[in-house]
Structure formats: structure tokens, C-alpha cells
Amino acid sequence: MRLDRVIEALLFAADTPVSADALARAIGCPIYEVEEKLENYGARLRDTSALQLVRIAGGYQLCTKPEYSEVLSRFLAPQNTRLSRAVLEVLAVVAYRQPVTLAEIEQVRGVDSTYGVHALLDRRLVREVGRKKTPGKPHLYGTTQQFLHVFKLDDLTQLPPLELSLSQDVGDGIPSEQGAFLLE
């Protein structure tokens, strides 16, 4: 079997981004060979395909090129999921302070955040990452690979600096009406 075709098959079958290391382990070859084939495959797709190879959420994934998004949206008719401003606030606290407990989230926000945490758990944007070693052993929450994928981040270092985020007006950059954020 040709290594480039095996990599293509694995990427096609994967429903989440796959690291070069995971590909190398699955195939049983050195990581440098996989990285070289990924680079060549990405270049070939750029010139000849409606697909592209993207590096996202710490791995690689096949996706369609942006110029096909409109026709794909009509074809797939995706369900839109709205995140309210309150849920976005909870997500921001988790993203910047993880691992964090519900009580710590509520201390930052000043209001009950139970609904927001549960909404984010349901959408797989946050997950329980452990228990805090304090009385009561509260759950600790952190972001997921899905969070990185949805917000098109390779890793958490790509989050905007916290000082920049706090200096902007709360409503700045929120694309939909009444402070809701639209996920596709």
C-alpha cells in the first residue's frame, strides 16, 4: 500500500482532526514520513480538488474549500445552534481559567452559571476534566477538542489575549442579534 493513500483513507474516515503522531502510530512508520506526505497531499489538494487539508485542533482534517460553503449550506441545511451571551460568558471563563469549578465561574460572573455549564456540556464545548482536591471535591471543567474545532483554533494559545478581550465593549464582535452567537 502507498503511504499517501493510506493517510488519505485515514483522514477521510476520521470524524475529528487527527495528529501526525496518531497517523504515524496507526500506519507504523516514522512521523517525519507522515508529515512529509501530509505536506505533499495538502499541496496536491490545493491545485486539484474541492477539498483542502487543514491543520486544526492539534491535528489535520479534510474539509471543503470556503468557496463551496454556500452551495454546501443549501444542500445540507445545517441546524444552527445559538449560544446566548450568558453561555458565552461561561465559555470564556472556562477557556481562560481552566481547569475551573462551577463556584469559580460563578465568582467571576457574579450569577448562577449552572445552566450555562450544562448547555456547554451538552454541546461538547466543555467537559469535566477532574475533581478539585478541596472539601466536596467539586467538578473541574475545561474546553474540548470540539471547542477548538468550532472556534477554528489549533490550540488554546491562539485565544486572544485576555486584556484585549476585557477592554472591548461586551457587544463588540458578536455577529448575531441580541448578543447571541451563531454556531454552524
Image: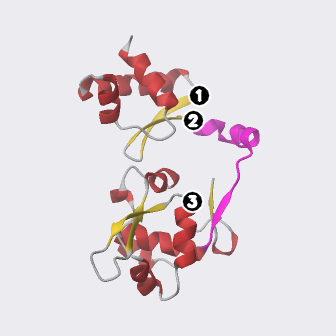
Residue ID at (42%, 70%): 94
Q: How far across and down, in percent of the image, does residue 106 sit? A: 45, 84
Residue displayed at 49% across by 27% down: 46
Quick one: SS at disc 1? Answer: loop
Which of 150 and 141 lies nearest the eye of the viewer?
141
Amino acid residing under circle 3: Arg
Relative to 177, 130 lies left or right: left
Contact flag, marks 1 and 3 (Cβ < 8 Å): no
Q: The N terminus is located in which quarter?
A: top left
Q: Is residue 98 visible?
A: yes
Mark 1 and mark 2: span between their CA atoms? 6 Å
* Number of the front mark, 1 or 3: 3
Q: Farthest residue in the front direction?
A: 136
Residue under label 1 = 50
Would you place residue 29 above or below residue 75 in this image?
A: above
Q: The disc labelled 1 sits on which kind of residue?
A: Ala
Residue at coordinates 31% horizontally, 74% vertically from top-left? 132
x then y, percent, for residue 149: 48, 50
Residue that lies at the very extreme toward the bottom in this rendered image: 110
Cβ atoms at labels 1 and 2 below 8 Å apart? yes
Colouring chosen for the image of the structure: secondary structure
Q: Nearer the viewer, residue 1 or 4?
A: 1
The stretch of residues the image draws in magenta is 65-84
Q: Is residue 81 magenta?
A: yes
Measuring from the top left, give residue 110's x and y in whole percent: 48, 89
Q: Is residue 173 visible?
A: no
Residue at mark 3: 123
- Cα gap from disc 3 to disc 2, whole angstroms: 25 Å
